[in-house]
Image (spheres, rainbow, N blue to C red):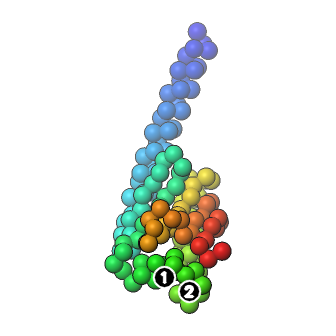
């Protein structure tokens, strides 16, 4: 009987922890969406633990990013590293909130399914310029 009740308690604890994590992920998604609201929308994919930033298409930033997306050699002139440094900081803050395993991606302007920059656990893992 003890083993059965231990399993029930363990399952209940795990379910409660999962619910708390889900709530924390939703709260951070809202905070990131608010923080980036002037330039785009942030969404979260629970299955892949990925936050995605999709830029609004009518801003100067999105026009610059679209040019870099088309021709990555323009990145230095457009100060791409300044922008990606801020994305790295966001990734580091996500890691502080959740520990490891979360990715932050900047999606393309010309192709919204294309990842232009990605950072995981505070480290760059891909960039259109490399």
Label 1 element class: helix
Q: Earlier in the sequence, mark 2 or mark 1?
A: 1
Q: Residue at x 36, y 72 (%)?
A: 56
Residue shown at the point (50%, 27%) measured from the top left: 12
Q: Real-space Cα distance between discs 2 and 1?
A: 7 Å
Q: For the N terminus, which image quadrant?
A: top right
Task: Find out whether the residues at labels 2 and 1 contact each other: C-beta distance under 8 Å.
Answer: yes
Q: Pointer 2: what residue? A: 74
* Residue lying at 53% horizontally and 51% vertically, measured from the top left: 49
Looking at the rendered structure, which numbered label has been put on residue 50?
none
Residue 80 in the image: state x and y as whole percent: 55, 81
Q: Position of residue 6 (x, y in %)?
A: 58, 20
According to the image, label 1 marks what residue?
67
Residue 77 is at least partly visible in this image: yes
Q: Is residue 18 left or right of residue 37?
A: right
The x and y percentages for residue 90 are 53, 67
Residue visible at 41% across and 71% down?
Answer: 55
């Amino acid at each position: 009987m003890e083993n059965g009740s231990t399993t029930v308690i363990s399952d209940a604890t795990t379910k409660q922890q999962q619910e708390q994590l889900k709530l924390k992920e939703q709260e951070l998604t809202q905070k990131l969406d608010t923080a980036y609201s002037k330039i785009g929308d942030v969404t979260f994919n629970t299955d892949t633990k990925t936050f995605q930033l999709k830029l609004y298409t009518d801003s100067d930033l999105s026009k610059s990013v679209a040019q870099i997306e088309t021709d990555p050699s323009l990145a230095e002139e457009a100060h791409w590293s300044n922008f990606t440094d801020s994305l790295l900081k966001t990734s580091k803050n996500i890691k502080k909130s959740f520990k490891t395993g979360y990715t932050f991606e900047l999606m393309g302007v010309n192709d919204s399914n294309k990842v232009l920059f990605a950072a995981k656990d505070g480290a760059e893992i891909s960039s259109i310029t490399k």
